Image (spheres, rainbow, N blue to C red):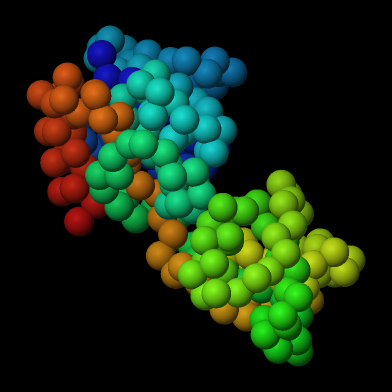
Amino acid sequence: MIYFALAKGRLADESAELLRKCGVDTSVLREDTRKLVLTSADGKYGFFLVKPTDVPTYVEAGVADVGIAGKDTLMEQDKDLYEMLDLRLGECRLCLAGYPDRKDALTNPHLRVATKYVNTAKKVFSERGEDVEIIHLNGSIELAPVTGLADVIFDIVQTGSTLKANGLAVLEDVFDHITARLVVNKVSLKTKAAEILPLIGKLREVVS
């Protein structure tokens, strides 16, 4: 059996549709259930529905053989797994954002940056040779500049509507192609190659 770790929510639905086009029986994922562990009707596939940020952990540990996770999550966690394929789902950007009339804030030698992507932000600013204060937040990141907690935020942007609603704007695109990626456990790729490699090939065809 091949076990998948899928992010709960819209990405799981989009992932299920991609897998269906590759011949994977994903009908169980369309059922109205609160179960988090599901098995396909043909008994060939198992599905774990987890938080998006937990997908890499399940795959790295080998609990799941294959997972679908956002590139932002993969960069932030830097887990020991194989990133096999860009699935081109949920495209967005990782940006620095703040008040549009304060773009010079980025040159502030005491810049305060609010983000949930702490490791990625540290790496970005370290590579630039800039010493900034990183403030870790888990949600409602846009609130940080509004309340004065931070000068700017480092966050995912898709449509920009939430930024606009809070009087903010993108000041700089840092990573402009953040999409869902197919990741595979290193051991599983060897021990279950006969099942996993053809699936990757089919997914590549469907995506392209």
Describe residue 184's horizontal placement relative to residue 145 as left or right.
left
Indicate the quadrant containing the N terminus: top left, top right, bottom left or bottom right: top left
Which quadrant of the view contains residue 164? Answer: bottom right
Work out whether 133 lies above or below 200: below
Q: Is residue 26 above or below residue 86?
A: above
Report the residue at 52% width, 32% height from top.
54
Name the image quarter holding residue 60.
top left
Q: Is residue 205 left or right of residue 170?
A: left
| Rendering coords of residue 59 (x, y %) | 38, 28
| Foreground pick, 37 / 109 | 109
Residues 172 and 163: in front is: 172
Rendered view: 48 above or below 16: above
Q: Is residue 143 left or right of residue 156?
A: right
Q: Nearer the viewer, residue 114 or 123?
A: 123
Image coordinates of residue 87 in percent, x first then y, are 31, 50
User: Which corner quadrant holds the C terminus?
Assistant: bottom left
Please say if 169 is above or below 27.
below
Determine if residue 89 is in view: yes
Residue found at x 57% / y 69%: 125
Query: At 53% across and 38% down in the image, what residue appears?
Result: 52
Marker count (numbered): 0
Q: Position of residue 153 (x, y in %)?
A: 69, 66
